[in-house]
Image (spheres, rainbow, N blue to C red):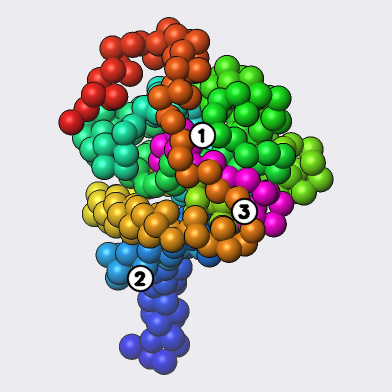
Amino acid sequence: MNAMTKFACALLGAAFLLPAAATAETALQLAIPTALNSHNGHAAKVFGEELERRTAGRYKITINAGTAEREMIESTQIGTLDIAITSTGPVGNFVPEVAIVDIPFLFRDAAHAHAVLDGEIGRALLDKFPAKDMVALAWGENGFRHLTNGVRPVNGPDDAKGLKIRTMENQVHMTAFRTLGALPTPMAFTEVFTALQQGTVDGQENPIPVILAGKFAQVQKHLTLTGHVYSPMVYIMAKSTYDGLSDADKAAVKEAAGAAAKAQREYVAKVDRDGVEELRKAGVAVVTEVDKAVFQAALAPAYEEYAKRFGKAEIDRIRNWK
């Protein structure tokens, strides 16, 4: 073989190696609705570390923080975003069955919620996503939602009347606040701080980790620990991205999501323990003694609507799950 032939063979060999080199490391775009220094940021980092470890570095996660949730879900659905970690609030607009978990006072505590979501009910809900061009990987945690406002302490349902409260674009949530006599005002989370600052809305409702990460203590005077809705996070992946993975890589993605969700739940539990005192130190007045039975009684008309939409038997199945 002369020198020219050897050179040609070397070039040909390099050409065959190029595709392998190009695909040796694949970047996946992951979006979260809050800042990086939040429970969602923590979960996204764990997801990336676990996926990289489980695929020997072939997949890496790039995190986009502070993205509007509806936009995240739409982008995942059409395949322009690989992964989203989103609260269930806006998910019901895409996968209607999931909205059942947003019913107020449905879950007794976090352990009850975890048992439901990690069991057959939660798995059945995750199975609804592929028909909407998404794959649901795991249930994470946002936490129990509480009410803040800048007008007055809310000690009971009557105190909520007339308050303009930012909600997600979620008919279950909006029905509840409307029933209490509040004025639900849906808007993207990315707009909430400015809306509170400018007085466009009086208050908002979110879990303690979100209230802290959103720096709402700067623009809200009152917090009531209503715990009115348990808010899960759901990890979703574009079906087009998922379908392009090998079986081994699909398993790695699901395992990484599961590890991230577990870490997220632990993070939320810690912030829930310590966060209220942090908000007090920031000048927020906190109502801790809340008669939830009084709120539930005030929501009776809303529960009638939920029963028509989701079926009383299915709601009771979740409510009574052991």
The earlier-in-sequence mark between 2 and 3 is 2
Disc 1 to disc 2, C-alpha distance: 33 Å
Range drawn in magenta: 215-233
Q: Which quadrant is the C terminus positioned in?
A: top left
Q: Is residue 97 magenta?
A: no
Residue at position x 59%, y 35% in the image: 154
Amino acid type of the residue that numbered disc 2 sits on in the rendered structure: Gly
- The residue where tag 2 is placed is 57
- The residue where tag 1 is placed is 89
Amino acid type of the residue that numbered disc 3 sits on in the rendered structure: Val
Tell me if residue 42 can be seen: yes
Secondary structure state at the residue bearing disc 2: loop
Q: Is residue 256 left or right of residue 88?
A: left
How packed is label 3: few (under 14 Cα within 10 Å), some, or many (20 or more)? Answer: many
Seen in the picture, residue 226 relative to 220 is either above or below; the reply is above
Across and down, in percent, residue 131 comes to 40, 26
How packed is label 2: few (under 14 Cα within 10 Å), some, or many (20 or more)? Answer: some
